[in-house]
Image: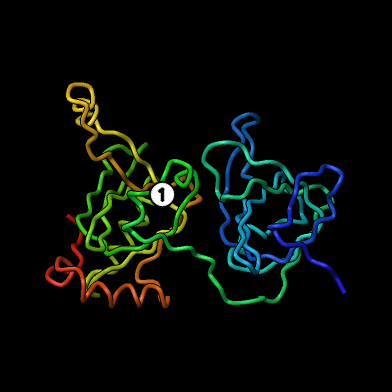
């Protein structure tokens, strides 16, 4: 019987390449090499049955991987990969390692092992209290959309600013193609009642504001920092009113707990 490794078992040993995994492709996104001006290449965020996530990078345009970039959500068997240590700073997963495909790497689509989406929803109330280490990884969260602002005057930097709410509110910024997709998607949701957006793999930014710096310098006061969620290139994604048990539960809790939502529901484009 074939033995499969768990992502949690991975260790960095260049002499070992015979790793074999059965994982779900949680997210796929392209990137380009600024050194060779080539691409697109693809990064895959993988999740195993236990929910452990790890990133795998595929370079080159090998026929063996052609079409795999369209298989997000599928389960695959992966055999023979190189293990590398993750760099410091922002990473797609909280694993200490990442994987790279080699010339002899084999990837084959298999039957699903379960129907889990592997989304680890962060409660909106916990986001302001995340420490700097936790902010090195993207998060999944959800909230009611309101107070949207479109900023498309600069074609080189289109942005869609909006807020999500669950008794408290948090600013969110969709950039680039995500900005247009958010605007169009929200427009299509008009007339359907409150709009709940599910954010998948968004980055948390937190800085001391200029006002806070002024107070800090002159009177030693630590004021509230600027906090917002932002798309991280093509890694991030979002869905409106996604049919998930967690979304249904969240929707019901809002109707009984959030006075703003009870009164106004979702606010359309300004």
Question: In this image, 158 relative to 192: left or right?
Answer: right
- Residue 181 in the image: above or below residue 96: below
Check disc 1 and report the residue beneath it.
Answer: 177
Residue shown at 63%/67% (left/top)? 50
Question: In this image, 234 relative to 66: left or right?
Answer: left
Q: Residues within 10 Å of mark 1 (few under 14, many from 20)?
A: some
Question: In this image, 133 relative to 63: left or right?
Answer: left
Question: In this image, 189 relative to 246: left or right?
Answer: left
Report the front residue among 239 and 177. Answer: 239
Count of numbered tags: 1
Quarter that holds the C terminus: bottom left
Horizontal and vertical percent position of residue 193 = 22, 74
- Residue 133 in the image: above or below residue 36: below
Report the front residue among 94 and 218. Answer: 218
Horizontal and vertical percent position of residue 160 = 30, 49
Residue shown at 72%/47% (left/top)? 100
Report the front residue among 132 and 149. Answer: 132
Residue shown at 27%/75% (left/top)? 253
In this view, which residue lies farthest toward the left?
263
Residue shown at 69%/58% (left/top)? 7
- Residue 176 in the image: above or below residue 116: above
Residue 26 figure quarter: bottom right
Horizontal and vertical percent position of residue 2 = 85, 70
Scheme of colours in the image: rainbow
Quarter that holds the N terminus: bottom right
Local secondary structure at mark 1: helix
Report the front residue among 230 and 54. Answer: 54
Residue 60 figure quarter: top right
């Amino acid at each position: 019987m074939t033995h499969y490794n768990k992502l949690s078992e991975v260790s960095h040993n260049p002499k070992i390449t015979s790793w074999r995994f059965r994982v779900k492709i949680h997210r796929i996104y392209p990137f380009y090499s600024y050194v060779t001006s080539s691409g697109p290449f693809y990064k895959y965020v993988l999740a195993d049955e236990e929910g452990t996530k790890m990133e795998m990078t595929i370079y080159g345009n090998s026929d063996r991987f052609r079409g795999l970039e369209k298989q997000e959500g599928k389960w695959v068997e992966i055999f023979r990969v190189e293990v590398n240590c993750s760099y410091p700073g922002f990473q797609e997963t909280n694993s200490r390692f990442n994987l790279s495909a080699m010339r002899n790497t084999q990837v084959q689509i298999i039957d699903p092992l379960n129907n889990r989406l592997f989304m680890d929803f962060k409660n909106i109330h916990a986001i302001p209290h995340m420490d700097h280490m936790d902010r090195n990884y993207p998060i999944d969260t959800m909230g009611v959309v309101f107070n949207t602002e479109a900023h498309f005057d600069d074609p080189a930097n289109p942005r869609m600013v909006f807020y999500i709410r669950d008794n408290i509110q948090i600013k969110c910024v969709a950039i680039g193609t995500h900005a247009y997709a958010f605007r169009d998607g929200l427009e299509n949701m008009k007339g359907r009642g409150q709009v709940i957006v599910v954010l998948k793999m968004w980055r948390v930014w937190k800085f001391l504001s200029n006002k806070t710096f002024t107070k800090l310098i002159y009177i030693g006061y630590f004021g509230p920092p600027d906090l917002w969620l932002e798309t991280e290139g093509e890694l991030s994604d979002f869905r409106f009113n996604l049919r998930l048990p967690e979304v249904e539960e969240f929707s019901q809790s809002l109707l009984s707990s959030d006075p703003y939502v009870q009164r106004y529901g979702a606010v359309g484009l300004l």
